[in-house]
């Protein structure tokens, strides 16, 4: 799937926002990659807004942390 440069930038910003909001004591190896995958999946399903991407990924953070620990 091809994404516009604008959407790629939006996805990057969403990724950085979500990862920055994870408390340091919950940050685990692989978290950023897993959150990026979540954002890519959301974009592939038509979610293209910054707020929507952040919300989609934020909803999955705890499950991702549980999976990686």
Image (spheres, rainbow, N blue to C red):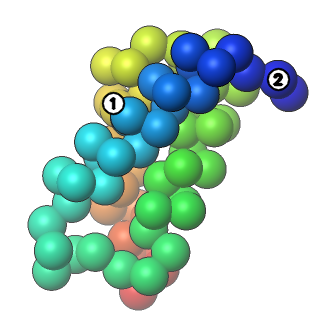
Looking at the rendered image, the quarter that the C terminus falls into is bottom left
Dot 1 crowding, Cα within 10 Å, few <14, some 14–19, many 20+: some
- The label shown at residue 55 is 1
Image-quadrant location for residue 22: bottom left
Q: Nearer the viewer, residue 4 or 57?
A: 4
Element marked by disc 1 = helix
Q: Are marks 1 and 2 in contact (CB under 8 Å)?
A: no
Q: Residue at x 73, y 21 (%)?
A: 3
Residue at 48% x, 53% y is 35
How far is disc 1 from disc 2 in space, using C-alphas? Answer: 22 Å
Q: Nearer the viewer, residue 57 or 29?
A: 29
Residue 45 seen in the figure: no
Q: Is residue 29 left or right of residue 21?
A: right
> Which of the two labelled residues, at mark 1 and mark 2, occupies the earlier sequence position?
2
Q: Position of residue 60 (x, y in %)?
A: 40, 49
Circle 2 Cα neighbour tier, 10 Å, few/some/many (<14 / 14–19 / ≥20): few
Q: What's the residue at 46%, 24% (across, down)?
A: 10
Determine whether 3 is above or below 38 in the image: above
Residue shown at 85% from the left, 27% from the top: 1
Front: mark 1 or 2 = 2
Q: Position of residue 25 (x, y in %)?
A: 15, 80
Q: Residue furthest front?
A: 5
Residue 60 seen in the figure? yes
Check residue 2 in the rendering and tell me which mark sits there, or answer none.
2
- The mark tally for this picture is 2
Q: Secondary structure at mark 2?
A: loop
Which residue lies most toward the right here? Answer: 1
Q: Is residue 56 above or below residue 25?
A: above
Q: Quadrant of residue 44?
A: top right
The correct choice, above or below, for 25 with respect to 40 in the image is below
């Amino acid at each position: 799937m091809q994404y516009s440069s604008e959407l790629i930038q939006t996805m990057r910003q969403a990724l950085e926002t979500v990862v920055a909001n994870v408390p340091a004591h919950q940050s685990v190896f692989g978290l950023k990659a897993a959150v990026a995958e979540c954002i890519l999946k959301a974009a592939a399903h038509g979610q293209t807004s910054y707020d929507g991407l952040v919300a989609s990924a934020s909803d999955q953070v705890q499950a991702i942390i549980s999976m990686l620990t």
